[in-house]
Image (cartoon, rainbow, N blue to C red):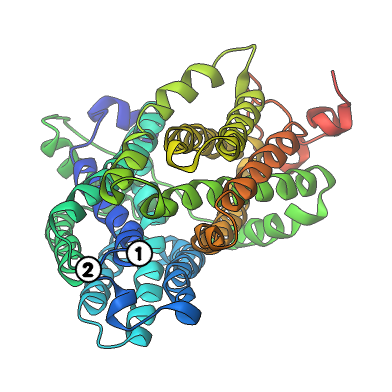
Amino acid sequence: YDLFVLFGVVFNFCVFLSVIFVCQVYMACQSMLIVLIGSTSSSSSSSWLLVHQQSYKVSLAGSLFFVGLLLGNVVFGPLSDRVGRRPVYLTGLFLEVIFGYVTAFSPSYEVFAGSRLLVGLMNGGIGLVCFVLTQEYVGKSYWAMTGTLTSMTFAVGIALFGALGYFIRPWRSLALVSNSTGVLCFLLSVTLPESPRWLYSQGQTERAEEVLRFMAQRNGSVVSNLRLHRVGVAKAGNHSNQRAGILQLMVHPILRLRTIVLMYVWYCCSLVYYGLTLGAGDSSGSRYVNVALYGLVELPAFPLCMFFINRPWAGRRKSMAAFLCLAGSACLCTIFIPENSSGSLALLGKLMVSAAFNIVYVYTSELYPTVIRNAGLGVCCMSCRVGGILAPFIPFMRSVSSSLPFIVFCLSGFSAGFLGLLLPETLHKPSVDTLDQLSPSLSRVSQGRR
């Protein structure tokens, strides 16, 4: 059998994905922890007297978490390509649970901030590996679905964390309980097999066959005489392509423009997405209800964006630009209404930017040739984390003016939306595999406006 054919013959949807989806809920709780522990009556602020001139340290701890996410993306991606998905995922999850307990029992602010950096490092790393595993455990026809469910379970995790915070007010107890779900995730994750696609790509065909038989059995499928075509692994060529790809992102004129535009779009999406989410704890009304709503509002975003991106009159480019501009418009409107009535528009802005975020993942993959797709996604993901690093400080701008954070979100949404129109449409266009297939005729900027 060919590996890609075999996935369709043996099974379509893998039961192991449920374990990864549970892990997404845990990672969402870790991502949102700073929202509630920095704003409750028994918060980290009061524990270490972080008031007045030192109140910025709460936001700093949130930013350190996102610094860790950035570093995790950089370190864990190449590491999982070299030693395998499973060992990197299990090691990262185990260490995240350990550092999560360090957060709960931190004796000082310095230990607390350091633990958030390390939790972010592990969270960003295993988040990347989790996404890869959701793709490599199933057939290609289910890739869009698994990617969507990953985002949706993360949103559910945000909502559940808000509900958990409602019943558990002391921040140390909240950190302890929310982190304990990671123990369950780790115990379940021990049962996960290695990615058969990674084994196959490394020339370990016999091990890949063993994993496929095991997965087929767990999925209730029976296949006799399961054999894969033997493959050779040209590692030298792969490394050469990777080095050339990273350089070509800035050297190739078409890729340079696409990369610069996409990096800015990813940055703005992250800034607005996390800025609105992290600001939920400071919004009017119950902070716990706000956090839950900011998670649940993401759920309609996926069917909404999927409807538009597959329509010829909208496509990827126009849909992404429209949702970003709508997010900016919602944030703009909050400036002209009373502060205690701005919550609904802020939720609408979160819905719109969530839809744009879903689109940009798909759109970016289609804009890069296969030989440098991972390099392009990696650079964009790093830009995304920069937005996340700055996001915790945006709600802090309320001390200057209550409308200032929304002005920043408005400008970010509009600028990213209009800049995104410079990119070419990819709907119903053939995929590009090599740099040689890229030509000025494929670039909207080179073509001029139609």
Q: Which amino acid type corresponds to the residue marked 2 in the rendered image?
A: Trp
Residue shown at the point (52%, 37%) measured from the top left: 353
Q: Tell me if residue 365 comes above or below residue 12 in the rendering.
A: below
Q: Is residue 426 left or right of residue 119?
A: right
- Image location (x, y in percent) of residue 295: 33, 41
- Image location (x, y in percent) of residue 107: 25, 88
Q: Is residue 203 visible?
A: no
Q: Which amino acid type corresponds to the residue marked 1 in the rendered image?
A: Ile
Q: Within the image, what quadrant is residue 296 found in?
A: top left
- Image location (x, y in percent) of residue 168: 14, 59
Q: Is residue 192 left or right of residue 48?
A: left
Q: Within the image, what quadrant is residue 433 found in?
A: top right
| Residue at which label 2 appears | 171
Q: Tell me if residue 399 comes above or below residue 112 in the rendering.
A: above
Towards the viewer: 312 or 58: 58
Towards the viewer: 317 or 50: 50
Q: CA distance from mark 2 to mark 1?
A: 10 Å
- Identify the secondary structure beneath mark 1: helix
Quarter placement of the C terminus: top right
Using the image, tell me which numbered label, if any, was put on residue 34.
1
Q: Tell me if residue 257 comes above or below residue 248 in the rendering.
A: above
Q: Within the image, what quadrant is residue 89 found in?
A: bottom left
Q: Tell me if residue 90 comes above or below residue 328 in the rendering.
A: below
Quarter placement of the N terminus: top left
